[in-house]
Amino acid sequence: MAKTQFAVEMGMGTDLRGADYTKAACRAVHDALHRNYLTVADAFGFGKDAMIVDIRIGVGQPGRVDLDAVKREAPYGQVSAEAVKGGADLEMNGNPVIVANAIVSVSFDVERTS
């Protein structure tokens, strides 16, 4: 069996007042997942628990992201998450604004025939 990628989605999330990197990251994953990810398993005849979900979050301070909270955004599958430098730390009207970007990859273990 070989891990084969079936879908990649991107999302963006923000926290406009609390400077909460985890909240922005979770919102970015939610944004990515609610595009078409949830139909991938059914479309190819796989069980939802067979999904391998890899999440990469880009934020200004990766160490401030609770990766367990981010992983809970994915409702099925074997989920992994990592935070890397990215996104944006901004200010609006004296308040910190955190922008997070998410890349969510959905793969399955499949046997290659070629």
Image: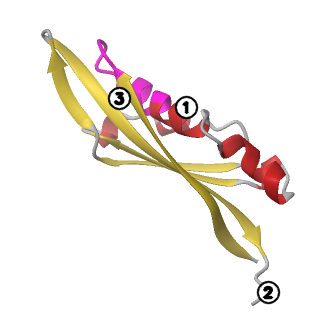
Label annotation for residue 7: none
The span shown in magenta is 15-27
Mark toward the viewer: 2 or 3: 2
For the residues carrying marks 1 and 3, which lies nearer the camera in this image?
Answer: 1
Q: Quadrant of residue 38?
A: top right
Residue density around tag 1, few if under 14, some if 14–19, many if 20 or more, within 10 Å:
many
Q: Earlier in the sequence, mark 2 or mark 3?
A: 3
Residue 33 within the segment the image draws in magenta = no
Q: Is residue 17 above or below residue 111?
A: above
Residue shown at 83% from the left, 50% from the top: 42
Q: Is residue 17 left or right of residue 54?
A: left
Residue 75: where, in percent of width, then height?
A: 70, 36
Mark closer to the chain start, 1 or 3: 3
Regarding mark 1 in the picture, which secondary structure is present there? helix
- Give the residue drawn at x 20%, y 18%: 96
The quarter of the picture where the N terminus appears is bottom right
Q: Are marks 2 and 3 in contact (CB under 8 Å)?
A: no
Q: Secondary structure at mark 3?
A: helix
Give the mark, 1 or 2, whose residue is nearer the N terminus.
1
Residue 13 in picture, x, y percent from top left:
41, 29
Q: Residue 25 colored magenta?
A: yes
Q: Mark 3 — residue? A: 21
Q: Residue 19 appears at what percent x and percent y?
A: 28, 20
- Identify the residue shown where x is 29% and y is 12%: 17
Report which residue position mark 2 lands on.
Answer: 113
User: Considering depth in this image, is 98 or 83 the residue closer to the camera?
Assistant: 98
Real-space CA distance between mark 1 and mark 2, rounded to the nearest whole angstrom: 34 Å
Classify residue 41 as left or right of residue 12: right
- Using the numbered discs, state the Cα–Cα distance from disc 1 to disc 3 in whole angstroms: 14 Å
| Circle 1 residue | 30
